[in-house]
Amino acid sequence: MNALQEKILKDGIVKQGNILKVDSFLNHQMDVELFNEMGKEWKKRFEGKKIDKILTIEASGIAIACIAAQHFGVPVVFAKKAKSVNLDGEMYTAEVESFTHKNKNTVIVSKKFISEGEGILIIDDFLANGCALQGLIHIVQAAGAHVEGIGIAIEKGFQAGGRMIRNMGYQLESLAIIDAMDWETGTITFRE
Amino acid sequence: MNALQEKILKDGIVKQGNILKVDSFLNHQMDVELFNEMGKEWKKRFEGKKIDKILTIEASGIAIACIAAQHFGVPVVFAKKAKSVNLDGEMYTAEVESFTHKNKNTVIVSKKFISEGEGILIIDDFLANGCALQGLIHIVQAAGAHVEGIGIAIEKGFQAGGRMIRNMGYQLESLAIIDAMDWETGTITFRE
């Protein structure tokens, strides 16, 4: 069992509707030491890959991606959820649906920050139906760059996203894959 | 001149309307090594302060706060801009206006993550009119916690926020205070 899985069992809270609350260490209050352990683990799992940049999506992906980036020695780019008056020039866009917030967002990445031929590691906190991830993959492909790997903190293994992404041939490394959650008993079952 | 000031002169772009674009290293693409230098500098400037937690605001404050947190050995809490269906329980709220996006947001912090008596270091990327900062200060005070200091990356010294915050007696440490910008010549003048 890795550090993230241990933390989920200790501090994660299962709620009705297949919701896992990890706001005490992952996406509201953030355990930076834990993120550092996660970064080390991804570095090991993506050993030998040509990674020029890490791509993530705001907001909670940013922290994990930045701490992980220290192990790869590369900059991070985050996809923004709303058009800012301060972000001019041409951009790559993708539509993504949020499971948590039950809404749709257009995410954008300035064309300046992903270049043809670059090796991109995508990092995000959650993978459920895979919508956010598909949006990020779409952006990398539109730039003529290459997805070298995908690092996810928590994958909901009982939803379709992970299977779909693996079927597409990507190296998807989720540090905690949850195969089942029971809110009545608080039980969380990780994939072996 | 510190690392951030050098980077601003090298890669910052002055646009009409007192806009400084730093999206190539601060708030879209992120230079994690630079953030580490900034974290070191804040650690030095807040030496001797009792800091239990760092508070920031999504999205671009998160990266800087998390890298800085490694130097303080404390967790980070970020104020969220929208109510999530996944964030239940009681929360502290504040209204903040965005200079960049020209809109108003309610920001929220779960009451679980700031406790009475805690020493809080607030970190954010930009300080202009100080609205976001006042919102965060309000939240810390509502929790009965104490603002031990405020670390800002870039302060627009020609706007009122910094003066107001310093007049309130806070130790405000902005790593780059810009006293003037000229978009026609691209000149940036830092405060000594």
Image (spheres, coloured by chain):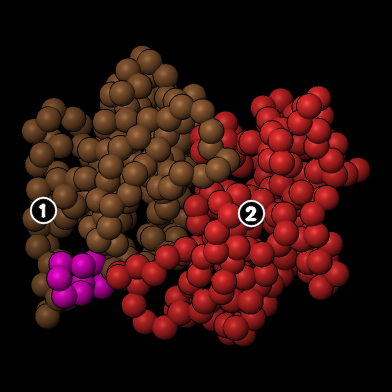
Chain colours: A brown, B red
Toward which corner of the image does residue B14 lie, by quadrant? top right
**Which residue is rendered at x = 63% and y = 36% of the image?**
B22
Q: Quadrant of residue A8?
A: bottom left
> Left or right: A74 with respect to A127?
right
Percent position of residue A118, x then y? 38, 19
Quadrant holding the N terminus of chain B: top right
Q: Is residue B49 magenta?
A: no
Q: Is residue A181 above or below residue A79?
A: below
Q: Is residue A71 above or below residue A7?
A: above
Is disc 1 surrounded by few (<14), some (14 to 19) or many (20+) residues within 10 Å?
A: some
Q: Residue at x 72, y 65 (%)?
A: B149
Residue drawn where x is 66% and y is 64% of the image: B131
Q: Residues within 10 Å of mark 2 (few under 14, many from 20)?
A: some
Q: Mark 1 highlights which residue?
A: A159
Q: How many labels were placed on the picture? A: 2
Please state if A38 lies on the left or on the right of B95 as rendered: left
- Three-letter code for the amino acid on which mark 2 is drawn: Phe
**What amino acid is at disc 1?**
Gln
Looking at the rendering, the stretch of residues picked out in magenta corresponds to A12-20
Q: Which mark is residue B99?
A: 2
Q: Nearer the viewer, residue A55 or A70?
A: A55
Q: Residue furthest right?
A: B192
Q: Secondary structure at mark 1?
A: loop
Residue A98 is drawn in which quadrant? bottom left
